[in-house]
Amino acid sequence: MLKTKALSRGKNTIEIGMFDPSSRMCSHCGYIYDDLKLSERTWTCPRCNITHDREWNAAINIKRFGLIKTGVPTDGGKLTPVDTIASTISLLEKEGIRQVKWLKQEAPRF
């Protein structure tokens, strides 16, 4: 229905993967919180100690996933480590690979 409405108004839609970790992934450092329960509305990232509202964090990640999928660089023209890890995880999940032990995360630069 969303696609139909968008097309009728001359707008584009971008689909992200159904299993992209939008709520579970820290939008700041890229940590994936696998044990997130549906009842948890907020969670604190054990890696960077930032507390996330589940819905707000998902919205940030969904935007990033969509931009990555279209090849549009995010935040200042470069893909950040979080963007890179998100796109890699999405591609691997499409191939049926669920655990990524070898993927390393750069420390954020301030």
Image (cartoon, rainbow, N blue to C red):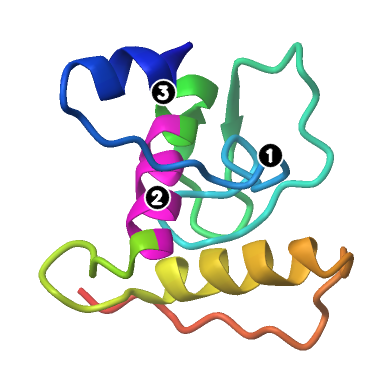
Q: Residues in magenta?
A: 59-69
Q: Secondary structure at mark 3?
A: helix
Question: In front: 86, or 96?
Answer: 96
Could you tell whether 49 is left or right of 71 in the image?
right
Residue shown at the point (32%, 70%) measured from the top left: 71
Separation of residues labelled 1 and 3 (CA atoms): 16 Å
Question: In front: 63, or 8?
Answer: 8
Q: Earlier in the sequence, mark 3 or mark 2?
A: 3
Separation of residues labelled 1 and 2 (CA atoms): 12 Å
Label 3 sits on what residue type?
Answer: Lys
Instruction: State the quadrant of the C terminus.
Output: bottom left
Q: Percent position (x, y) of residue 8?
A: 24, 16
Q: Percent position (x, y) of residue 94?
A: 76, 62
**Which quadrant of the view contains residue 54?**
top right
Residue shown at the point (21%, 78%) measured from the top left: 78
Disc 2 marks which residue?
Answer: 66
Q: Percent position (x, y) of residue 109?
A: 27, 79
Disc 1 marks which residue?
Answer: 18
Residue shown at the point (28%, 24%) measured from the top left: 7
